[in-house]
Every structure is written in structure tokens, then in C-alpha cells.
Amino acid sequence: MLLDVARFRNQDQTVKGAEVEIYVTVPSQSLTYRQRAPKTFQAAATVTLEILKADGKPAYQETITLKPPVLNDTTAAIKNPLSFQKRIVLLDGSYTLRGRVRDQYHAGAEGTAEMPLVLQSAGKGTALSDLVLLARPAAKSPGQNNFTRGGYLLTRTPGGMYTRGANQLYFYAELYQAPQSQKLSLRYHLQSEEGAAADAEASLDNVAAGKPTTILGELPLGPLPTGNYTLTVDVLDARKQVLASQTAHVRREAETYAPAGAAVPK
């Protein structure tokens, strides 16, 4: 199971906290498929998601059952992962995010993933939200659901993984309190632990007054080799000085095929 988290500024700025998006992904490749009818097989996983305060008391808890699409052949080489997403408003503080997954059709097959979660309001200055790494370009969407944000449908790449056939990195972010009196631009830098790198620049148009400015970025991966990378996104003023900056971890698997983005559970 993979846990991805993105922190956005709380819409109610009188409250010291953040709107947190938690994205849970379960690779269905490892689940047990049970025959439901002739040539009909399906798996199921139960996921319990918890957010614990620093004192160990729960701030949030939910259990959900995920079921992948029915298959007529369980030997398929690639099965799309399952995912669900929650948006929760939390006060500033230190938390532990924990997820537990259990295979419903295989007794004892379960796992746990957890990660620290720290929320600290950035104040009234110019700031960037966390970067949301995407498997494909954000698509305009008039609908509203847990997979849309800022008027766009976002297809996240679980765990920041870009595999063989994924030649472009896409991301979504929000810029807060952007200055209105000058021209802004963006600078992207992708750097591996071994020194491989890619760079790009873009103008930042349509800066919103009094509300978040949506940033949709992309960066060619091209021949970048397998490895762990850090993506850095800088917002620059007219003098090319950094106004705000944010980073995200990226994993490149140039030799491995994998599904492009997690499927929305039905």
C-alpha cells in the first residue's frame, strides 16, 4: 500500500491549519482473485486509514472496501491499482498517518504503512502548496469529486513513480498570495542522487487576485535513467528572485512497465 499526501492552505484563513489530501493506493497485482461465476474473477481489499495526534489520540479514522474491476483472466500481466482519496481539514500540529490493508480473500495477508504529517501555517506571504505528481496532464472538469481540484481532474502517479513509457512528468500545485504588480515565472529542476538532471522554465499567467493561482506544470523525462530524483519548483519574480519554492520526491523506473495512474474505484 502507498500513502501520498498533499497539503493545501485552509480556505478559512482564520483557522490555523491546512486542507490535507490523502491518496491511498493498493496494487491489485498482489491481491487474491476469487471466482464469482464462470470466467468471472474479482478481488477485494479492506483499508483502514487513521490520523493520530502527537498524544496518540485519533484525529480521523475510516475503513473502506476497494474492489478492482471483474476479470475473466487472472493471468493478466498488468492489473490497475486501486485508490481512494480523502480531504480533511486539520489544525496545525504533528500527526502520524497510518494505513492498514487486508486482502479479503486471503487470511493473514495484510500490511501497514505509515508516515509523519506535520502541518504549520505559512502565514500571509507568498507560498506554494505541496506538489501533486500526475501520471497524465490535468484535464478540465466541470464536476466535483475527490479526484478534482481547482476545476481539474487529477490522475495521480502513486508514490511518485514514472515507469517505462512515461516520457513526461506532470504536476499540479497552488500558489497563494501571489503579488499582482509584477510578472512571475516558474523554474523546474529535476535532480537525481547520481547527478542526472532536467530543467525547464515557464511563464506564470492568469495570476489570481485574492484566491489560489492554479499551476499546471510538465517536464520531459526523456532518457533520464532509473533512480531517485528530487523535483524542485520555484516561483520567480521579475528579477528572477525566488518568491516561493516546493520539492517532491520522484522515482524513475526506465525499464519497468506499470499502469499509468490508479483507477477510480466504482
Image: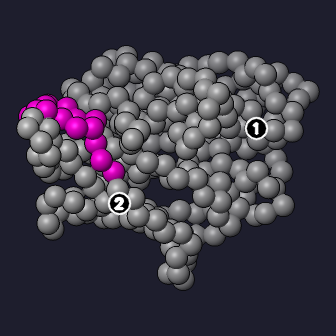
Location of residue 170 in the rendering, given as x and y in whole percent from the top left corner = 50, 26
Q: What kind of element bears circle 2?
A: strand
Residue drawn at 35 percent across, 56 percent down: 65
Residue 255 appears in view: yes
Residue 76, which numbered label?
none
Left or right of residue 78, residue 163 in this image? right
For the residue carrying disc 2, how many other residues have a C-alpha within 10 Å: few (<14), some (14-19), or many (20+)?
A: many
Residue that mark 1 sits on: 212
Residue that mark 2 sits on: 47
Query: Mark 1 or 2 closer to N-term?
Result: 2
Residue drawn at 41 percent across, 64 percent down: 63
Residue drawn at 60 percent across, 26 percent down: 141
Q: Main secondary structure of the magenta part?
A: loop
Q: Is residue 86 above or below residue 142?
A: below
Q: What kind of element bears circle 1?
A: loop
Residue 228 lies in what quarter of the image?
top left
Residue 138 lies in what quarter of the image?
top right
Front residue (pair 19, 174) = 19
Q: CA distance from mark 1 to mark 2?
A: 32 Å
**Which colour style is shown?**
one colour
Location of residue 219 in the rendering, given as x and y in whole percent from the top left corner = 50, 21
For the residue carrying disc 1, how many other residues have a C-alpha within 10 Å: few (<14), some (14-19), or many (20+)?
A: many
Locate the C terminus and report the quarter of the image it occupies.
top left
> In the image, which residues are magenta?
66-80
Q: Amino acid at mark 1?
A: Pro
